[in-house]
Image (spheres, rainbow, N blue to C red):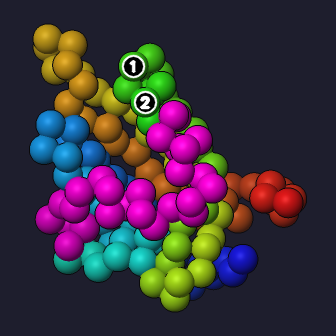
Amino acid sequence: MVELTDAETTDSGIFTWDITQDLVYGDSALAELFGLVSEETNQGLPLKLYLDRVHPNDRPRLARTITQTIVGGRAQQSFYRVKTRGEVYVSVVAFGRCFRDRNGTPVLYSGMVVLESATSTNDNRWH
């Protein structure tokens, strides 16, 4: 596993998933972390494109966490690996929350993603 340096990714990636449109809007830092093009993430991409960049072993757990967050209405914290533009995986931690409209329907899921190394010194998480 290769880690991005602070010089390569200096910000936390910010995102908002419009659940009804199935479009995830992300800033340039999120694009960098997921190996995507920032011009495209700024305009919104389907959630599937982001999930395809998540390590296959981490996808089921991440999907459960997202579902639990939407159903339960609580904030979440997730640890998983994403594939960068260089086709290597880096460990990230994501924080997110689902927002509902006045009828109680989930409409937005917003949060941030940061390199795990920026939040923890636990080198054994994936061993």
Residue 90, quarter of the rendered image: bottom right
Magenta segment:
40-65
Query: In the rendered view, would you say 84 is above or below 72?
Result: below
- Foreground of the two, 73 or 49: 49
Residue ID at (38%, 26%): 70
Q: Which amino acid type is shown beneath numbered disc 2?
A: Thr
Q: Do the residues labelled 1 and 2 touch (CB within 8 Å)?
A: yes
* Disc 1, SS: helix
Residue 122, quarter of the rendered image: bottom right
Q: Would residue 45 be seen by someone viewing this image from the given angle?
A: yes
The quarter of the picture where the N terminus appears is bottom right
Q: Is residue 110 magenta?
A: no
Rendered location of residue 46, percent (x, y): 23, 57
Mark 1 to mark 2: distance in Å? 6 Å
Q: Which amino acid type is shown beneath numbered disc 1?
A: Val
Residue ID at (14%, 65%): 43
Query: Is 7 displayed left or right of 112 in the figure?
Result: right
Residue 67, label in figure? 2
The residue beneath circle 1 is 71
Rendered location of residue 116, percent (x, y): 66, 60
Residue ID at (13%, 44%): 21
Q: Is residue 45 magenta?
A: yes
Residue 24, label in figure? none
Rendered location of residue 91, percent (x, y): 65, 64
- Foreground of the two, 48 or 8: 48
Residue ID at (44%, 51%): 112
